Every structure is written in structure tokens, then in C-alpha cells.
Amino acid sequence: MVNTILKEADLFCPNSVRINFTIYLTFDKQGKAYFSSYVGGSRAMKIYQGTIAPKKVHFRLLYQGLRQRPGEKNQSIGYNAANNRLYFISDDSISSVSVSKLVSGKLKPGNVHSSVFSSKREFEGLAFSKNGQGYLLTNRGDELLSTNGL
């Protein structure tokens, strides 16, 4: 699957307000795009799903998000087609959710998988091969690590 970083993307709102931001996207098996954002003043995370076409971009806020986001900084988002899960990457922590449960509004706290590490590294991104092999990019000790069992 493909992870994409849109640097300094321009977002035009209906009321003619232009917002400039950096966004991390990932795409599922059906080509739907996902991104996340942290909720200021809380530990929560909002998750968005959308489509991108040559002349139209549409995203919607999903009904459910995460009450406890991973880490302090939103580093990246990834998708594993082998298990149909979204992965949220932060420094030294990873959380994941089932896409089908998230989109259907049936996500429960027990469906959220979270891991906190003590590597003292920055986790920069996580990408997966078609068969589910994960590759974690780290900083402060630049390495590309392969996963087992995500």
C-alpha cells in the first residue's frame, strides 16, 4: 500500500478561507484515503476518510476516533491490507484500529491495539507490503526496521 505525504497542501473551504498544512495520507484496498489529527487540549485523535479524484477531493470526519492518541506528535499513518488495520505512528508508540469497525461505527476500546516502546527513537513512518510485512522508519539512529506480528 502507498503512504503519501502532502507537504504544504492547500485546502480551500467553502467560505473562501485557505488553510495551508502538512498532511500524512494512507490508502486502503478500495482506494479510500485516511488521515488523522490531534484534538487540541486533549489526548484525543480525529480520523478522516475520503476520496481523491482528478477534479474532486472529499473527506469526512469518521464518527469514531481515539480517546487516547499514541504519543505527543502525529508522525505518520499507515495501512496494512493483510489485516485491514490503520496504524497511527508517534514517537516511540504505535496504535492501530480495524478499518471495518472504525467505518461502521462499531469500534470498541478492546479493538484498539497500542504499543509503547522505550527505544528513545523517533518513529517516522510505517508501511506494509501486500503480504503484511511491515517496515518502520526510525530517526535518531536512522534505520529501516522490518516487523513481525503487527
Image (cartoon, grey):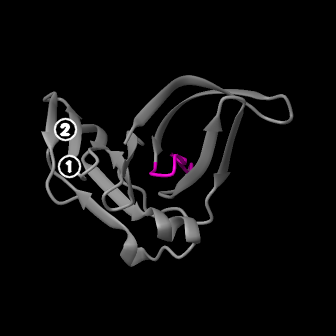
Give residue 9's quadrant in the image: top right
Of residues 140 and 63, the one drawn nearer to the viewer in this rendering: 63
Residue 38 relative to residue 1: left or right: right
Query: Picture coordinates of residue 2 (x, y %)?
Result: 39, 38
In terms of sequence position, does the residue under pointer 1 or pointer 2 come before the other? Answer: 2
Q: Quadrant of the C terminus?
A: bottom left
In this orientation, does residue 67 appear? no
Q: Inspect the image, locate mark 2, and give the three-letter code of the amino acid beneath it.
A: Arg
Query: What amino acid is found at the position of numbered circle 1 in the picture?
Result: Gln
Per the image, is 103 magenta?
Answer: no
Q: Which secondary structure, mark 1?
A: loop
Residue 30 in the magenta stretch? The answer is: yes
Q: CA distance from mark 1 to mark 2?
A: 21 Å
Q: Tell me if residue 146 comes above or below residue 148 in the rendering.
A: above
Quadrant where the N terminus is found in the figure: top left
* Numbered label attached to residue 121: 2
Q: Which mark is residue 133?
A: 1
Report the side of 47 relative to 110 (left or right). Answer: right
Helix, strand or loop for disc 2: loop
Mark 2 nearby-residue class (10 Å; few <14, some 14–19, many ≥20): some
The magenta span reads 28-40
- Above or below residue 80? Residue 102 is below
- Number of the label disc, if any, that sits on residue 104: none
The location of residue 15, given as percent across then percent down, is: 86, 34
Residue 20: x and y in percent read 63, 25
Q: Is residue 114 visible?
A: yes
- Looking at this view, name the residue that lies furthest to the right: 15
Residue at x 25% of width, y 60% of height: 115
- Residue at the extreme top of the image, as rendered: 8
Q: Nearer the viewer, residue 43 or 137?
A: 137
